Image (tube, rainbow, N blue to C red):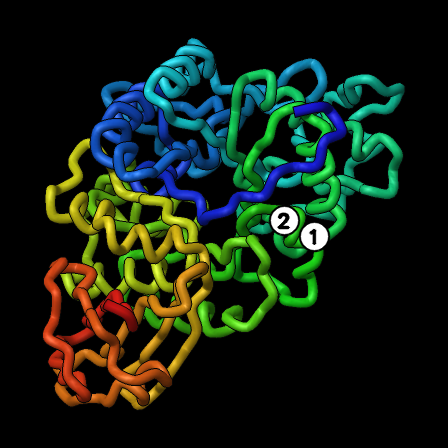
Amino acid sequence: MPPTAKRQRLAQPPMGWNSFDAYGCSADDRVVRENLDAFARLLRPAGYEYFVIDNGWFGEYRIVEGERFTRELHANDIRIDDYGRLLPSHVSFPDGFSPLIQQASTLGIKLGLHLMRGIPRKAVELNLPIEGTDAHAADIADLADTCPWCDYMFGVNTDHPAAQAYYDSVFRLFASWGIDFVKVDDIIHKPREIEAVAGAIEHCGRDLVLSLSPGGQMDPQLLPVYQRADMFRITKDIWDRRADLDRGFERWEAVQDLPLDGLWPDLDMIPFGKLMKWNPPGEDRENCDLLAGVGFERDDRFTPAQRRTFLAQRALAASPLFVGGDLVDMTDEIAALLTNPCMLACNQNGVVGGLQLRQPPIDVWLCPHRSSPDEWWLGIFNRSEKAWQGEFTWPQLTGFPSPAAVRDVWSGQTLEVASDLPAQLGADDVLFLHCHAGP
């Protein structure tokens, strides 16, 4: 990509894996390589493409002798270069990222990194130079602008002429490594730094995907700025809790009518399978903050019905699909859900579905096909903890007469079509349908 070219927007929601739900900020080279091989085997054939290492990859963590992972929530030291830019940790990635990027490239997988907004405090303390300028880190740092949950960085004063040069230098470095995806955190509420990051990506010579986080501070008024990115978090951190199903519905409903135009609404990662593997029970682990994830090592606590509802939400909302659980130990059942071709077709259709009908405890959401007016996907969700049965007419559900053909997304079975649609749903379950008006 020429240095001043405008980035191409993604035509479909991106799909991939992120290390956070399984490894917090402790993913190291061995963990990453094992999961990369599993990703290539389990998810890449179904179209999942991006493999993202979350926060902490630059942290020089202390690890207690005989233990696998660090007990530190925040590293006491981080690794940076002579221009104040983050580098892969000697502790976690002793050979750097080059071997990993080569492995990913060989497997047809694109590597991504998490990045905290701002400039490292360490760079400011050392007052390192900004590459290509006469300015130094202390000149562009906003010492009053800090992240309340991760203190590695100071915000950048975007009024300073060297602020853009700093971000440009960071993304040039990422591009030179071969990075294809960057999740920038603590930035969703900072429009001027979003603009600076987006500009840096456009200047870096590589077409990086830009993801904005976290979702708790998402402001619809900033949508024109968010449009500089490819995806933006619309929820707070999502975990394997029933309440987070409701949170997903609430945030989806809040953005369903926004003119997103290829900006994908991110409902956060998919916490299925083995979670928090870095965090076994122990005396120092009773209170985990959000930086380190939630809870102890476990299998996710969703029921099969809740997993179906969780994925149907994301498919119908055109949310990016990023798996969060450990891939090495993923069960066949979970892998089958994540790679269900009809579910993926709905998601990759790239249309944010909308609420069609609400008759508590039932929600009905509809996603039209992008290019076929006679085709749509329908989700009939039981949002209660009790089983439900009833029936609807097709005009109630869709505003259209009975379709000619209906297929159950999860089972793949073709259903008999009548003027009424009877439904029997267990607690927190969904009837997820792919419908055609024509033959």
Q: Secondary structure at mark 2?
A: loop
Image: 228 above or below 154:
below
Left or right side of 163 for 109: left
- Give the label on residue 187, or none: 2
Image: 437 above or below 137:
below
Q: Position of residue 108 (x, y in %)?
A: 37, 23
The residue that appears at 24% across and 89% down in the rendered structure is 393
Q: Position of residue 60 (x, y in %)?
A: 48, 22
Between 292 and 347, the one lying in front of the other is: 347
Q: Secondary structure at mark 1?
A: loop
Between 408 and 121, the one lying in front of the other is: 408
Q: Position of residue 63 (x, y in %)?
A: 35, 23
Number of labelled discs? 2
Residues at circles 2 and 1 in contact by the CB criterion of under 8 Å: yes
Q: What residue type is disc 1 on?
A: Lys
Q: Position of residue 193 (x, y in %)?
A: 72, 45
The image quadrant where one finds the N terminus is: top right
The image quadrant where one finds the C terminus is: bottom left
Image: 230 above or below 326:
below
Q: Which residue is mark 1?
A: 190
Left or right side of 410 for 247: right
